[in-house]
Image (cartoon, helix red, strand yellow):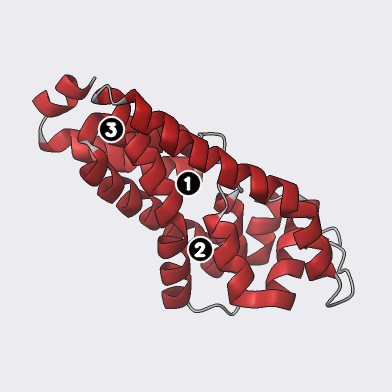
Amino acid sequence: MRQAVADSGWAATFVFLGLQIGQVLFAPIPGEITGFMGGYMFGALNGFLLSSIGLTIGSMINFGIGHFLGERVVRKLVRCETYDKYNQMVQYKGILIIFIFFLIPGFPKDYLCMFLGLTTLPARVFFVLSTIGRIPGTLALSLQGASIFEKNYMFFVIVTALSLLFALVCYLARDALYRWIARYGKKKTCDPLP
């Protein structure tokens, strides 16, 4: 696979960028797989950079969908419960919470990007939060992919163990985090669109 990428030259870079952008726009495509592929095919550094560029572009497009197409479109794409949850979190804890959710591996950031486009969050602040917040996870996936290609299995195990530990802590703390946020305001329910 890596040799095929090398043989296709500049086109491979754009195909991979398109794949990373697409996985942000179409939630069923798992971002963990594409991030791993980037490290495997392009090496740790190039895979990380290409993945970061693709994820940032995809995130900005989703933010733009929310910002320019508005609530009616986002509400058709995002389940009511998800909409309520994001609304409550952003409304009561703001930028810190947004940044934390971009850090959490496996958190559905695609919908979050769309929802944030509906808020008063400036695009440049969103750009910084989403780009910096994704760095740890993207770097870990790129390192994992590169270590498998290089047959450095011990390094792969170490990075994977640290990533799983971080994901487990986030998973176990999720309910406590939601309750902590919910204490700071009344729950707003998602009214059906007319």
Considering only order in the chain, which callout, 1 or 3, is on the residue closer to the N terminus?
A: 1
Task: Tell me if residue 19 can be seen.
Answer: no
Considering only order in the chain, which callout, 3 or 2, is on the residue closer to the N terminus?
A: 2
Cα–Cα span, label 2 and label 1: 11 Å
The residue at the point 80 percent across, 68 percent down is: 180
Considering only order in the chain, which callout, 1 or 2, is on the residue closer to the N terminus?
A: 1
Looking at the rendered image, the disc whose residue lies closer to the viewer, 2 or 3, is 3
Give the label on residue 24, or none: 1
Residue 134, compared with residue 16, is above or below; it is below
- The N terminus is located in which quarter? top left
Name the element at disc 2.
Answer: helix
Cα–Cα span, label 3 and label 1: 22 Å
Labels in figure, total:
3
Task: Tell me if residue 154 can be seen.
Answer: yes
Q: Nearer the viewer, residue 126 or 173?
A: 173
The residue at the point 29 percent across, 37 percent down is: 16
Which percent across, then down, holds residue 162? 50, 42
Residue at the spot of label 3: 146
Residue 8, compared with residue 42, is above or below; it is above
Q: Amino acid at mark 1?
A: Val
The answer to whether mark 3 and mark 1 are in CB contact below 8 A is: no
The residue at the point 18 percent across, 27 percent down is: 5
